[in-house]
Image (spheres, rainbow, N blue to C red):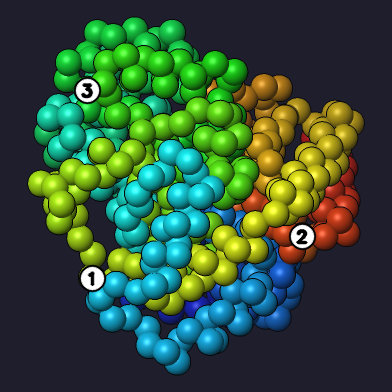
């Protein structure tokens, strides 16, 4: 029993009896850092408040969706107005049209878009569509990129051979990953060679344009351009999984920030403003292959749910002007600079940041690939996590996650976070001596 947080500890104990591992998504169980997860009672702006009534500056932000912060007035007001009008019809609504138009305006490459209920559904459907469009079966993904829990994408590298993959979860038959090829993120030479060799079989290349699921790893200059060139040359569908980066790293996502337009884009997280959502969209000629116009089947009882769409519209409308992205950039930059200053006092590690998403890696001086990330000091990260928590800062409970800064984070929040890190680093230094 955690005597410091008895209410959370009690709930976790009850939860473990009736929910596998006590949680509805594995990373929430804090297995990477140890201890009982906080149970959250409510949240406001940059703060989450746990069952004990303690407030923490939150850098999880629901794993990315809450770019406006918790319980943002724009979203809450829109929901309060929308809910009494009905929470679902299973028939089209005006708001879905508005949201699709808004997405298209922000992302030039998304000529048509279909809403689904999660990022997983988005990538699963985009891959089916790419296969249906090209008539080919193989998909190439990158080691360290995460695209939800789609069977075919839960693939890890087979022994030694770069292009050979095995299931990365029990319950996924080998046959389900047999059509998945693996390549190294930020290694344009090897991936282009592989694509050239297997081009006749490849339906799609799927990539997180900024890797966000091994911690933040930005694309090296030329990497995304190389993927664009080689896929276009062979008629392979290039899919950007922008579930995290969409509306996060720029108004038009990573495709705007890096100036590379994919054929299909997967969205989620920010698009739902905190409610469950996903979407996939892109070139009109590819999207035309989708049912009911085309032969590729895809459907969803709650897809385009009016409550979800309301939260998404309110969020995207609040992200209209260039000043909001400037503000996110400034706050992210301030946090990065503060963390780096503390690292420079003798803590081994580095910070990777793209806009308002960043990761503090403990150990390596440079992280440009998932292999670099894997070299991090996970035990030290666990101490950092608990040290920051004790100082009122809630970080993602794993070294391999992105921290998210929202518009609700103030300069004072950022300064308090840096001060907490400095204080922890001092304690950690004393421990090491
Ligand atoms: C979160 C995430 C997904 C999966 O989205 P869910 O809504 O959790 O299914 C897919 N791709 C990326 C890049 C993600 O970060």
- Where residue 288 sits, quadrant-wise, is top left
The numbered disc on residue 384 is none
Question: For the residue carrying disc 3, how many other residues have a C-alpha within 10 Å: few (<14), some (14-19), or many (20+)?
Answer: many
Q: Residue at x 59, y 74 (%)?
A: 75
- Looking at the image, tell me whether mark 1 or mark 2 is earlier in sequence order: 1
Q: Disc 1 marks which residue? A: 301
Q: Nearer the viewer, mark 2 or mark 3?
A: 3
Q: Which residue is mark 2?
A: 409
User: What residue lies at 89% left-to-right and 31% top-to-bottom?
Assistant: 345
Circles 3 and 1, Cβ within 8 Å, touching? The answer is no
Q: Name the side, left or right, on which 336 lies relative to 136.
A: right
In the image, is the residue at mark 3 within 8 Å of ligand 1 by its beta carbon?
Answer: no
Q: Regarding mark 1 in the picture, which secondary structure is present there?
A: loop
Residue 47, image x, y percentages: 72, 69
Which numbered disc, 3 or 1, marks the residue that appears first in the sequence? 3
State the CA–CA distance, disc 3 to disc 1: 31 Å
Q: Is residue 42 above or below residue 160?
A: below
Q: From the viewer's perspective, is residue 412 above or below residue 341?
A: below
């Amino acid at each position: 029993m955690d005597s410091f947080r008895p209410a959370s500890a009690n709930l976790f104990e009850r939860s473990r009896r009736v929910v596998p591992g006590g949680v509805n998504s594995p990373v929430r169980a804090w297995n990477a850092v140890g201890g009982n997860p906080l149970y959250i009672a409510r949240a406001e702006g940059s703060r989450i408040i746990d069952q004990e009534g303690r407030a923490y500056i939150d850098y999880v932000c629901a794993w990315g969706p809450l770019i406006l912060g918790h319980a943002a007035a724009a979203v809450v007001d829109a929901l309060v107005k929308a809910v009494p009008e009905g929470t679902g019809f299973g028939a089209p609504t005006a708001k879905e049209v508005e949201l699709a138009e808004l997405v298209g305006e922000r992302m030039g490459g998304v000529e048509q878009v279909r809403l689904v209920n999660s990022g997983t559904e988005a990538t699963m459907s985009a891959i089916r569509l790419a296969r249906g469009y090209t008539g080919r079966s193989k998909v190439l993904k990158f080691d360290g990129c995460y695209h939800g829990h789609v069977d075919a994408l839960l693939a890890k590298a087979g022994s030694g051979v770069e292009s050979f993959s095995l299931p990365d979860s029990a319950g996924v038959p080998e046959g389900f990953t047999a059509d998945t090829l693996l390549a190294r993120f930020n290694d344009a030479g090897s991936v282009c060679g592989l694509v050239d060799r297997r081009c006749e079989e490849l339906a799609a290349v799927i990539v997180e344009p900024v890797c966000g699921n091994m911690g933040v790893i930005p694309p090296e200059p030329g990497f995304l351009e190389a993927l664009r060139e080689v896929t276009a040359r062979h008629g392979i569908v290039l899919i950007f999984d922008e579930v995290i980066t969409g509306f996060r790293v720029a108004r038009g996502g990573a495709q705007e920030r890096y100036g590379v337009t994919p054929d299909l884009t997967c969205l989620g997280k920010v698009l739902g403003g905190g409610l469950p959502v996903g979407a996939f969209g892109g070139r009109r000629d590819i999207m035309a292959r989708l049912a009911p116009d085309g032969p590729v089947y895809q459907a969803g009882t709650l897809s385009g749910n009016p409550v979800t769409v309301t939260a998404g519209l309110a969020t995207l409308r609040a992200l209209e002007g260039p000043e909001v992205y400037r503000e996110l950039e400034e706050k992210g930059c301030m946090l990065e600079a503060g963390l780096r200053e503390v690292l420079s006092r003798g803590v081994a590690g580095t910070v990777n940041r793209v806009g308002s998403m960043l990761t503090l890696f403990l150990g390596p001086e440079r992280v440009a690939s998932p292999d670099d990330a894997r070299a991090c000091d996970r035990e030290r990260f666990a101490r950092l996590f608990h040290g920051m928590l004790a100082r009122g800062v809630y970080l993602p409970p794993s070294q391999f996650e992105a921290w998210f800064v929202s518009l609700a984070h103030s300069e004072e929040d950022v300064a308090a976070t840096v001060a907490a890190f400095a204080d922890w680093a001092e304690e950690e230094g004393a421990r090491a001596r």
